[in-house]
Amino acid sequence: MRYKVKYPGLRTAFLILSLTITAFSMETEQSVDVKRSLKEASNKTRAGLFAEAENILRAAINADDKRSDAKVELAYVLTKQRRLGEAYDIVLPIVQSEPKNARALAVLGSTMLTGGRFREARLLFFNSIKLDRRQHLAWAGYGLLDFYENRINDSVENLRESVYYAPDEPDYLFALAQVSARAEKYKEAADAYRDFLSVSNGADADRRARIRGLINFLRYLGNSGTLYRVGGAEKTVLPFDLIGNRPIIKLKINGNEEPLRFVLDTGSGISVISEATAKRLKIKSITKGGFARGIGGDGKFEIVYGLLRQIEVGDVNLRQVPVYIRKFHADAQDVDGYIGLALISKFLTTIDYGDKTFALTRRSNDEKEFRDAVGLSLPLRLTSSGFLSGEVQLQGVESPLNFIVDTGASVSVISAGVAKEDGLVPFANEEKLRVIGSAGVTNDVQTFKLPKVTFGKHSETDITAVALDLDVINEASGFEQSGILGGNFLKNYRMTFDFKNSKVTFVSVKPDKD
């Protein structure tokens, strides 16, 4: 049986997954050395020393180029470095010639998953586990797939399986911690992060500081009772101001009557409050967690965790809301904070750029509301870092690309790599823009005028986009993101987010053309 696989930037290939018998040669003294190298490379990989692992594996392959196990591990190390084309070209022939090689199937699945090719990845993980139930990389892959597609409970179970078979694998522990936190299993998340630190001696000091701070915060949350407790009306609708293509609502915090200005930001995980506003409202930090990397400025900002006693959004209120407390870097933002996905995902959420209204519907009514929403429903996925991602087609680029759907971004973004595509180079502008990111301000950023941007069946023309290095986003996303769909595209629609089913309904709000 043959399965056709399409992969961006790579030739079309066939995965031959039929069962055959493969003969193996007798081991030589040379192969024993290769085994030793494989073990050493595995230790380097677990420590995050990918370049060193790569060098060891290439030397082993040069010593014995018939050892497919070394080639498979090299493909895995290249995938960890997001060098997906190289990994694919190495591991695919092995899968074709050794269809019973469970590890090769799992590595190819990981390569596909990192590239955003979910269907192919799922098939590969399935066949890997069918051949070898103990293939922990395939279990981890299944767990991440479920996470990205919002099957959180399934994700937790599959990642527990991967940890059971490989308890010292840092990546599995880290993923289990992330997903457990998403499932609001805060104690399990904290324990998994603790175990990650115990087995990942190669993690840099900044990362270890971030994780220690996160562990402290998770343990605090685990002792704080139920988070995001919803009260008030079954549904609320309130107006927003559209400033710089960003929807801004007014809300109240901790019983204070002062109306605060918050951006509706689907590009943020948990909500954010400005350092100045937190100080004014006497909101104290719970713990700090080192420095995070972000876009703009020097690329870093301090992580400070807080907990809001209450947020009033129109006629709805939420109690026990976790937030980041962060310094805002430009007066141009002129806002008190950002409402993130962790909050609005508790509701069926509608952002209507036509009427400039924002609606939250409680879970008891949301199924009917979504059925009644007229328009095209498009699938969304959730990245490891908590962003919503959907497939976007750009004129000039052959394959669809994964873009973050970000109502908090004024303009759209393409990655620096995508900006170099031959089909997009002619659309570069002489105009440069000033970009305000989470880590500061970047000046003189290259802009593009994209002739056509398509999301599902909805297209917009002449969309301005800035070209940015998205490595910091992709390092944490789990699968490759090629851009950000910002407010200059989204402002043309009414969007209803069904977080329970990972879908968004788009309805055009532009006037009909004569």
Image (cartoon, grey):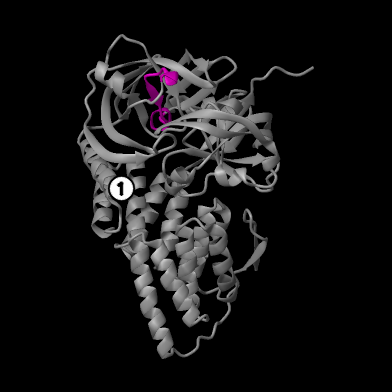
From this view, report whether residue 238 is shown above or below residue 360. Answer: above
Q: Quadrant of the N terminus?
A: bottom right
Report the amino acid beneath label 1. Answer: Arg
Query: Residue shown at 48%/77% (left/top)?
Result: 61
- x and y, in percent, of residue 222 in the image: 23, 38
Which of the image's four quarters has the C terminus? top right
Question: How busy is the neighbourhood of tag 1: few (under 14 within 10 Å), some, or many (20 plus)?
Answer: some
Q: Is residue 332 magenta?
A: yes
Residue at 38% x, 76% y: name it. 37
239 vs 289, left or right, is: right
Q: Is residue 177 above or below residue 240?
A: below
**Looking at the image, which is closer to me, 53 or 381?**
53
Q: Is residue 105 left or right of 282 when viewed as pictured? A: right
> Which residue is label 1 attached to?
207
* Quarter holding residue 293: top left
Q: x%, y% of residue 52?
A: 39, 66
Left or right relative to 81: residue 222: left
Q: Can I make out residue 74 in this image?
A: yes
Q: Position of residue 318 (x, y in %)?
A: 33, 23
The range drawn in magenta is 331-346
Q: Secondary structure at mark 1?
A: helix
